[in-house]
Amino acid sequence: MKELLDILSEVREYIEGDWFLGDGGLLGVIREGRLIKHDTDLDIYLLPNAKINIPENSHLKIQNYYMDRKLYDDRNPPNKLNKWLEYTSFIRTQNLHLNRPQFCKLASESYKQKGIKPVFTKYSVDIYQLKINNGVYVYDHWPNFFFKKDEVEHLQTNNSLGFEIKIPNNAVNILKRQYGDEWNILDKDFKYN
């Protein structure tokens, strides 16, 4: 967890505008008052007015990946991922109407040109730039995943990680929406879809 905390603590200095910790990081902060053990990434959401300006000489780098941007410390070795599996997973999320043979065929036709070699490290922060659509904040790749205005405007400050972060209002409602009514019960077999 130290690697994630170090990255998150440092990147806060480079964010201009409003942002908040979400998903598993938010779950850990609200449920346990810390990050979830064995978590290898965090998710931060930037509101439309926000951007990250990392100096060129920083060891923090950003890689544009399939559905997000990965923030990582380039002093650590790259993550060893199955590039084909990563790409087919991306293709599948973009083509939910296709069955397995269909999305695998589609992926094989474009993999050589559009496959991305991951250079980000095992511990990374996923960056999602939100936009306003029909009165809610959404991310392009998941239009059914949303934050209401009252959840992300006038964010709360939290110090559970040993430094100040922003979290959304009504975090429990968001966690229920993402993880179900039993969000506060540790489920070691949980798989996020």
Image: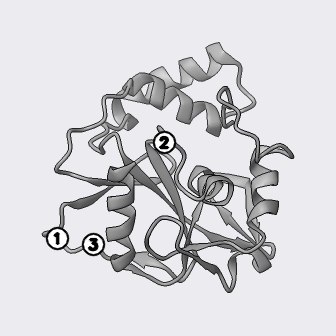
What residue occupies the far left of the structure in this picture? 57
Where on the picture, by quarter, is residue 56? bottom left
* Residue type indicated by callout 1: Glu
Give the mark toward the camera: 2 or 3.
2
Say which residue label 1 marks: 56
Left or right of 170? Residue 112 is left
Where on the picture, by quarter, is residue 175? bottom right
Quadrant into which the C terminus falls: top right
Colour mapping used in the image: one colour
Earlier along the polypeptide chain: callout 2 or callout 3? 2
Determine the CA span between mark 1 and mark 2: 28 Å
Q: Where does the image place residue 178, in percent across and percent down from the top left?
A: 75, 49
Tag 1 and tag 3, C-beta contact below 8 Å: yes
What residue occupies the far right of the structure in this picture? 181
Label tally: 3
Q: Nearer the viewer, residue 134 or 54?
A: 54
Q: Secondary structure at mark 3?
A: loop
Q: Nearer the viewer, residue 6 or 74?
A: 6
* Residue type indicated by callout 2: Asp
Q: Where does the image place residue 18, in percent across and percent down from the top left?
A: 54, 81
Say which residue label 3 marks: 54
Residue at the image point whose x is 20% and y is 44% from the top? 76
Q: Where does the image place residue 117, in percent across and percent down from the top left?
A: 30, 36
Left or right of 65? Residue 117 is left
Give the mark toward the camera: 1 or 2.
2
Earlier along the polypeptide chain: callout 1 or callout 2? 2
Q: Secondary structure at mark 1?
A: loop
Determine the CA span between mark 2 and mark 3: 24 Å
Left or right of 124? Residue 138 is right
| Label annotation for residue 39 | 2
Question: Can residue 64 be seen from the camera position used here?
Answer: no
